[in-house]
């Protein structure tokens, strides 16, 4: 016999958080957007030189591509 166990989180916040993380992990375009944000943060952490600028530009491009593509796909499926 099999049973499903509750994670112990009685409020809706835990389910909502897992829903957001699950949405990002199951969406290639949102994953690209998150990688873009990580590139931007990496460029901010470096803060000097050509690599900081390159990471910021690549990150911004990846973020805009990911969010825009996700929005277009979401709009088309509505």
Image: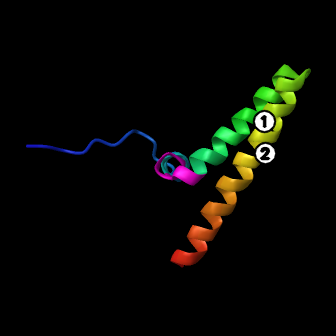
Residue 52's spot in the image, x, y percent?
84, 27
Vertical relation: 3 (above or below) 73? above
Q: Is residue 60 or residue 24 the one in the foreground?
A: 60
Residue at x 69% of width, y 62% of height = 68
Task: Give the image quarter of residue 54.
Answer: top right
Residue 45: image quadrant is top right
Which residue is under mark 2? 60
Crowd rating for badge 1 (residues with CA inside 10 Å; few <14, some 14–19, many 20+): many
Tell me the CA gap for discs 2 and 1. Answer: 7 Å
User: As drawn, is 43 to the left or to the right of 14?
Assistant: right
* Of the image marks 2 and 1, the number of the one nearer the N terminus: 1
Residue at image coords 38%, 39% = 7
Magenta residues span 23-29
The single residue placed furthest to the left in the displayed view is 1
Residue 71 spot, x, y in % from top left? 64, 66
Q: Position of residue 25 (x, y in %)?
A: 49, 45
Tell me, yes or no, whether the highlighted magenta stretch contains residue 14: no
Circles 2 and 1, Cβ within 8 Å, touching? The answer is yes
SS of the residue under disc 2: helix
Tag 1 residue: 40
Please tell me which residue is depicted at 92% across the width and 21% down the height of the picture. Answer: 48
- Say left or right for 18 vs 42: left
Other residues around mark 2 within 10 Å, as few (<14) / some (14–19) / many (≥20): some
For the N terminus, the image quarter is top left
Identify the element where label 1 is drawn: helix
Quarter of the picture containing the C terminus is bottom right
**Residue 74 horizontal/vertical position (percent):** 57, 69
Q: How many marks?
A: 2
């Amino acid at each position: 016999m099999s049973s499903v166990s509750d994670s112990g989180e009685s409020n809706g916040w835990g389910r909502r958080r897992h829903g957001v993380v699950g949405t990002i992990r199951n969406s290639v375009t949102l994953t690209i957007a998150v990688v873009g944000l990580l590139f931007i943060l990496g460029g901010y952490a470096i803060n000097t030189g050509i690599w900081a600028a390159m990471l910021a530009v690549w990150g911004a491009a990846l973020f805009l591509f990911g969010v825009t593509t996700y929005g277009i796909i979401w709009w088309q499926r509505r």
